Amino acid sequence: MIGDRLGKWVIFKELGRGGMGRVYLAQEELTGRQAALKILSSELAQEIGFLHRFQREIETLSRLDHPNIVRFYEAGFENGLYFYAMEYVEGMSLEQIIEEQGRLPWADVVAIALQVTPALRHVHDHGVIHRDIKPSNLLLDKNGQIKLTDFGIAKVFDSTHLTATGGIVGTAEFLSPEQAAGKVVGKRSDLYCLGCVLYTLLTGHTPFTGASYVELLHKHRYGQFDRPQMFVPDIPHEIDEIVCQLLEKDPDKRPRDAL
């Protein structure tokens, strides 16, 4: 699709692809503004479930307005393709940074956490549970600002009801025990996932590893992880303690909210 137009956007290059479709770097023809253009694959658009999921992602992102969340621009349908345009973040994901550098200094992890948690509070205050907080969905731009992205499996609720039941969704290494059990999810489910991310940034590896998806689900529900301080003794006790609290099996034992 390089060189093609969708609405007012001219496509320049592919940025990535996933289960739902592809993401391209595009430019607004009149203003020159850049955007990341997410396009639902034409095959999946024929399946009502995938189309609804794509439309729900658009609805979710359009609700949010926070400096640490990728900004939604517009959605459209043209030439048989469903798409939406969002803020283009020039930088790297935390997953890429860990792969290149290994674990991060604890002070850098704290700086990251202090950007992610306000974003999560904003998400939750707008009746959304992200359900897939992980390093690849946290982008670090060239100014050192974190941007939360990918609301493809987010749950949207009204402001008074922030829980729902459903099947197992999310990424196995960064999945809360209640998600692993297919149970009710809420704000504290995202906080567990955040705990997995912070643990990974501090130690260079996830709290749990397993040979299979099922084994990882079992460990999130019943396994015991080694405290971050066992691997990185210079982590302040308070930081070690809050990460362990985020990783409590019982949601009621986790911090009450992102604030």
Image (tube, rainbow, N blue to C red):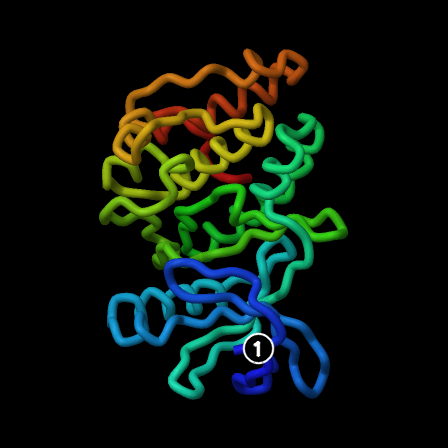
Asked if residue 129 is positioned above or below residue 108 in the image, the reply reads below
- The x and y percentages for residue 8 are 59, 86
- The x and y percentages for residue 89 are 65, 59
Is 135 on the left-hand or right-hand side of 152? right
Which residue is painted at 52% across and 49% down in the image? Answer: 137
Decide if residue 121 is in sight here.
Answer: no
- The x and y percentages for residue 171 are 38, 42
Location of mark 1 (residue): 2
Task: Pick the residue in front: 4 or 45.
Answer: 4
Which residue is painted at 48% across and 56% down in the image? Answer: 150
Which residue is painted at 38% across and 63% down in the image? Answer: 20
- The x and y percentages for residue 29 are 67, 85
Asked if residue 160 is positioned above or below residue 255 in the image, the reply reads below
Which residue is painted at 33% across and 28% down in the image? Answer: 211
What type is the residue that disc 1 sits on?
Ile
Q: Residues within 10 Å of mark 1 (few under 14, many from 20)?
A: few
Asked if residue 14 is positioned above or below residue 242 in the image, the reply reads below
